[in-house]
Image (cartoon, rainbow, N blue to C red):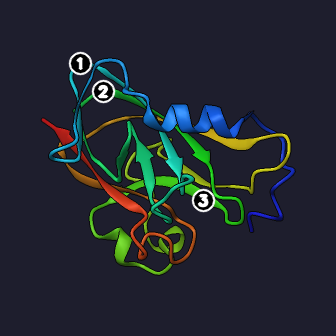
């Protein structure tokens, strides 16, 4: 699937820029490597998720230098997630779903997005033009625990998933 969409139109970034974005601490966030968590206060959360970054681990998201961190936002916050597919030979995406969705082999068929606008189903392979970039933006609704995951079949089961907590 990634090869099929490698030449799809859309924004791209260089490998160096992708690495920078995957390690960048988001504005207004508290990053805690000890608990592998990122906490946002206020009514907006802007972050970048690097899918399957160079240097691994494979089938994971790197956000603010952490691997699949727990992300906490306030209910009603506007959440914007930039997604960069850094994997040279596989498609990846990011969808926010209900908890437990990562256990499905094919979450794209079994787990709808938890919030309107909370899905980027997949991005194609990088090319000489750079790595594909996409963005999702949604309002964090009801308080609760959700998952963000890669909806490409088998990826979430291999560990390409994390937790999103919406505090009430």
Disc nearest the viewer among 1 and 2: 1
Spatial CA distance of label 1 from label 3 is 29 Å
Looking at the image, the residue that sits furthest to the front is 55
x and y, in percent, of residue 141 in the image: 28, 38
Up-down: is 66 above or below 74? Answer: below
Q: Nearer the viewer, mark 2 or mark 3?
A: 3
- Position of residue 41 measured from the top left corner of the image (x, y, whole percent): 21, 22
Alpha carbons under labels 2 and 3: distance apart: 25 Å
Q: Nearer the viewer, residue 131 or 112?
A: 131
Name the image quarter holding residue 23: top left
Q: Quadrant of residue 16?
A: top right
Residue linked to disc 1 = 42
Measured from the top left, where is residue 167 in percent x and y? Answer: 15, 37
Q: Position of residue 36 (x, y in %)?
A: 22, 47
Residue at disc 3, secondary structure: strand
Say left or right for 35 vs 157.
Answer: left
The image quadrant where one finds the N terminus is bottom right
For residue 92, the mark is 3
**Residue for badge 2:** 77
Of the image marks 2 and 3, the number of the one nearer the N terminus = 2
Q: Secondary structure at mark 2?
A: loop
How many residues crowd around disc 3 within 10 Å: few (fewer than 14), some, or many (20 or more)?
A: many
Work out whether residue 126 or residue 56 is closer to the camera in this orientation and state it. Answer: 56
Q: Write the residue at 71% across / 65% down.
A: 89
Say which label, 1 or 3, has the lower sequence index.
1
User: Alpha-carbon neighbours of circle 2 within 10 Å: few (<14), some, or many (≥20)?
Assistant: some
Among all residues in the image, which is located at the extreme left? Answer: 168
The reply to whether discs 1 and 2 touch (Cβ–Cβ < 8 Å) is yes
């Amino acid at each position: 699937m990634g090869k099929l969409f490698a030449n799809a139109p859309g924004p791209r970034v260089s490998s160096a820029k992708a690495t920078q974005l995957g390690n960048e601490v988001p504005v207004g966030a508290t990053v805690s490597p000890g608990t592998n968590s990122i906490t946002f206060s206020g009514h907006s959360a802007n972050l970048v998720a690097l899918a399957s970054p160079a240097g691994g681990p494979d089938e994971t998201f790197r956000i603010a230098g952490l691997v699949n961190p727990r992300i906490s936002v306030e209910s009603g916050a506007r959440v914007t997630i930039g997604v960069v597919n850094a994997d040279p030979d596989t498609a990846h995406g990011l969808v926010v779903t209900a908890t437990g969705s990562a256990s499905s082999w094919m979450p794209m068929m079994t787990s709808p997005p938890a919030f309107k606008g909370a899905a980027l189903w997949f991005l194609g392979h990088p090319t000489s033009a750079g790595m594909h970039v996409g963005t999702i933006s949604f309002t964090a609704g009801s308080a609760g625990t959700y998952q963000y995951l890669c909806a490409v079949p088998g990826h979430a089961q291999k560990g390409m998933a994390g937790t999103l907590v919406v505090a009430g």
